[in-house]
Amino acid sequence: MSMNTLKLSNVTFCAELEKHRSKVAGVYGLIDPVISRLATLNPLWMFEAQSRYNVQDGFLVSDFVVKLDGEYLGNIGTSYMGQKGTVIAISNDRIGKNRQRSSSYRTSDADKAVLMAKKMFGKMNPAERLQKAKEAAERVVSRASWAKERERTQYQSILKNEMLAWVENKGYQLFREFIDKEALLSTKKQVLQAEEKIQVLDTEMKTIERVQEDFGINKTALVVKDAGKYLVRIGDNVELYDDNSLPLDVRMKMGMLKLVQDEEYLTDVGCRVTSEIFVLLVDDLTNVSEGE
């Protein structure tokens, strides 16, 4: 490594590395001769140090951006290449366009790296400039469309929410008159079916919420069917019954729950967890364990 390269007039630091200039130990040894020779041969090129490689007493500069009159020419840095380990990496759009495995030209030979940079670094020709402009325009155009669509969706959501709130309150009667008098039969059928379904679901939700609340405070009867016997737990009280001694209200509610599928709820009855486990709503807990 050498400090001489960093003393060249066209070798600078990015703002972040400039804060730590006092800790610079030099340029990473592998790329130091490449930067030194190219900076000397091309005094108008500007080499801006971008990345660092930490060492014991500071850091080594390990990546440079190369520019000419403010225009990007390429990058010179390091890369890892399988069995070869750390190698020199030369990259820009021209190089990347012609390569398949990597977007950069990688070598451990400084002479080859210098030749590649001399060959491929240079200001864009008209065709390249047009292609670059096209890519930039595509990004702006597509991003603008996406941003406007997102903004429109946000305001549309506000509008729809306010419209729905109005319809659900003051405007619901007007909506029903429209459905009854003007809407297509198919639309009217869908709306009526939806209203009926909502009523059913509201009832089911109330049942579920009641079961959840009572179960959470141990006010339900947890029934486990096991080998012809019934374990019934209410709070801390546990009783064992058979078919003859099982309390009437427990037997009736289990009978109804046996007619539904697992994980279904019945209003004022409870929940069938599985074919062997039931959670029952119990209004009068003092009579549960007293049988018929």
Image (cartoon, helix red, strand yellow):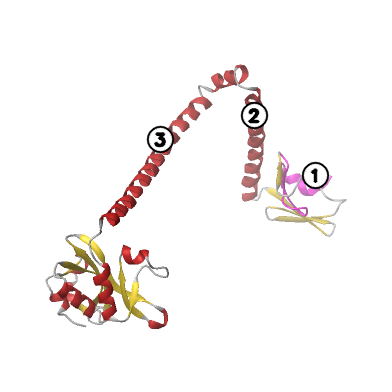
| Nearer to us: label 2 or label 1 | 2
Depth check: 286 or 9 in front? 9
Q: Are marks 2 and 1 in contact (CB under 8 Å)?
A: no
Using the numbered discs, state the Cα–Cα distance from disc 2 to disc 3 in whole angstroms. 28 Å
Please name the residue shown 37% across and 40% down the image: 148
- Is 130 on the left or on the right of 234, as rendered? left
Q: Is residue 146 shown above or below 181? A: below
Residue 251 location (% of width, % of height): 81, 46
Q: Secondary structure at mark 2?
A: helix
Q: Magenta stretch: give its range.
A: 268-292
Q: Secondary structure at mark 1?
A: loop
Residue that label 2 marks: 190
Please name the residue shown 42% across and 68% down the image: 100
Counting residues from the N terminus, which is met first, the one under dot 3 or under dot 1?
Answer: 3
Q: Secondary structure at mark 3?
A: helix
Depth check: 129 or 228 in front? 129
Residue 155 numbered tag:
3
Counting residues from the N terminus, which is met first, the one under dot 2 or under dot 1?
Answer: 2
The reply to whether residue 144 is in sight is yes
Q: Is residue 197 shown above or below 140? A: above
| Nearer to us: label 3 or label 1 | 3
Give the residue type that dot 2 points to. Answer: Gln
Please name the residue shown 64% across and 29% down the image: 190
Give the residue type that dot 1 points to. Answer: Leu
Residue 204 location (% of width, % of height): 66, 39
Give the residue type that dot 3 points to. Answer: Tyr
Q: Are marks 2 and 3 in contact (CB under 8 Å)?
A: no
Determine if the magenta segment contains residue 271. Answer: yes
Counting residues from the N terminus, which is met first, the one under dot 2 or under dot 3?
Answer: 3
Q: Is residue 207 shown above or below 15? A: above
Residue that label 1 marks: 259
